[in-house]
Amino acid sequence: MNHLSILIIDDEDQLRKLLARILSLEGFDITEAADIKTARQLINRKSYAVVLCDVKLPDGNGLDFIYEIKQKDPLAEVILLTAYGNIADGVTAIKQGAFDYITKGDDNDRIIPLVNQAMEKVKSSRAKAISIKEQTSYNFESIIGNSPVIKHAVLLAKKIAPSETTVLLLGETGTGKEVFANAIHEESKSNGNAFVAINCSAFTRELLEGELFGHKAGAFTGAVKDKKGLIEMADKGTLFLDEIGEMNIELQAKLLRVLENGEFIKLGDTKTTNVSVRLIAATNRDLLKSIGEGTFREDLYYRINVFSIHLPALRERIKDIKELANHFIRKISVKESKTIPVLSDAAQALMEQYEWKGNIRELKNIMERAVILEDDGIILPIHLPYEIQEKQDNKNKGLSLAGVEKSHIHKMLQYNNYNKTKTAETLGIGLTTLYRKMEEYHIPK
C-alpha cells in the first residue's frame, strides 16, 4: 500500500541485498525477489510504485515481464538492470514501457536519482488521476457544440442536475465525461461543496481502496497517520468515478454499501463512517457484457444506472469539429504566447474526414501540435499528423498525372499562405509557369 514501496528482482543475492540496503537507507520500503515466479506472487498481493528488475532471470526475461507488471499496475515504473549495458536491450526496454535501464556496477551513482525520478513520476501520475475542484470549474456553457446529439446530451444533463439522483455517463474515452460531470455538479444543490474525481483505471485494487475509503494509522506498513479517503472528502458534494467498469468486484461491494446506506469502514478501522454523497459514474465499457463475464456486479449496475446519458463520439458530431478546434487553438495560443492562427479550410476538411478514435482529447492534442508547428498565422494540412494528411493523399490515388500535379500545387499554395513567389520557389518552377499552371487547372488566385 505504501506509495514508496520498491520491488527488487534479481537472482544475484549480493547485488540485490546491496541495492535493498542502499534504497532502504533512503527511506523506501523494499521487497526482494530472486525470480519472476516469486515476483509475480508479490505483485499479485501488493502494489509497488517502482520495480527494479534484472533482464536475465532464472525463469524468464525481465523485458517480457515489464508487460505483466504494467498490466497489474499501469502507473508503476520499471527500471531494468542489465549486466552488459546492451543498447538493443535498452531500446527494447523503453519501447516495452520501462522508465529507464541501468548497467549493473557501472551506474551505481545513477540508482538513487533514477529511483527518485521514477517515484516522482508515479506520484504525479496518481495525482493526475485524482482531481478535487477548488476554483476551476465547468458549467454547461463550457460544453461546445451545436450538433443535435450533443445538444440532446446537454438537455438531459440539465434536467437531472438539480436532483441528487445518481448519473451514469456512457461513451468512448475522450468524449468529455468529466466536463459533463463537473457541469452537473455546478448546477446541483451541492455546488458549494466538493467535486471529487478519480479515474478507477489508474489504480490497482488495493491502491484504489485506500484512495476511496482512506485508512487508520497502522493499517499497513507505512500508514503512519490517518488518511481521509475521497468518499469522505466528497461528503455533501459529488463523487465522480471515471471508468467505473475497471473497479475490482470486491470494491464494488463496498461502494454499493455506500450508495445504499451512506456508510463504510476505513482500512484498519472498527467503526463505520457516514457520508452523504451524490455519485456520478462513467464508463466506456458495456457493463451488461461485464455482468455476463462476472466482472461487474448486477446490483451495483442497477444502482448506478438510475439516469444514463450517452455522450456522442466526435465522429458523430462532425459539424462541431471546427468550433471545437478553434476553441483549442485560442486556448493553446494564449498559453504559448502566440498570435492566434486561422484554421485553413483545407485542414478543416481533412479533420472532418478523420475517424477521431481518441475523440475530443485527441483533437485537443492535435491542435496543440499544430499551433506549435505553424509560423505564418494559418494552420495548414502540413501541420496535421500524417494519419490525417493521408486522407488527402488517398484522394489522389487513381488520379491522372495532371490531377496529381494540380493537387500538389494546391497544397503548396496553402502551405505558403498563397504567396505565389514562395510557392514557385518551393516547387522549383518560375513564377510565370506557376501562374500558367494555376490558370490551366482553374486554381483560384
Image: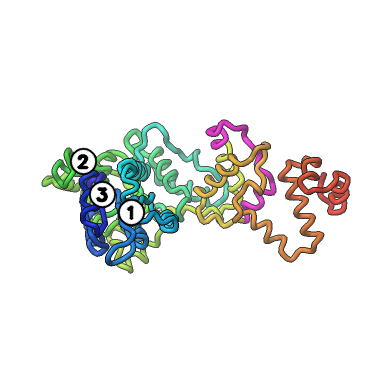
- Spot occupied by residue 396 in the image (x, y as percentages of width and height): 72, 60
In terms of image quadrants, where is residue 22? top left
Closer to us: 394 or 240: 394
- Residue identifier under label 1: 81
CB under 8 Å between discs 1 and 3: no
Q: Which of the pair 342/406 is nearer the observer?
A: 406
Kindly check if marks 3 and 2 are in contact, taking CB atoms under 8 A apart as contact: no
Residue under numbered circle 3: 6
| Neighbour tally class for label 3: few under 14, some 14-19, many 20 plus, Cα within 10 Å | many
Q: Does 268 sit left or right of 255 as displayed?
A: left
**Residue, far left:** 270
Expressed as whole percent of the image width and height from the top left, the position of residue 331 reads 54, 36
Q: Residue at x 37, y 39 (%)?
A: 188
Examine the image and state in which quarter residue 178 appears: top left
- Say which quadrant the C terminus sits in: top right
In what element is the residue under mark 3? strand
Residue on which the image places disc 2:
25
| Neighbourhood count class around disc 2 (C-alpha, 10 Å): few under 14, some 14–19, many 20 upward | few
- Measure how far apart labels 1 and 2 are at the Cα level: 20 Å
Report the side of 292 relative to 329 (left or right): left
Q: Is residue 365 left or right of residue 279?
A: right
Q: Residue at x 71, y 64 (%)?
A: 397
What secondary structure is found at the residue carrying circle 1? Answer: strand
* Precedes in sequence: disc 1 or disc 2: 2
Q: Quadrant of residue 112?
A: top left
Tags 1 and 2 in contact by the CB under 8 Å rule?
A: no
| Kind of residue indicated by mark 3 | Ile
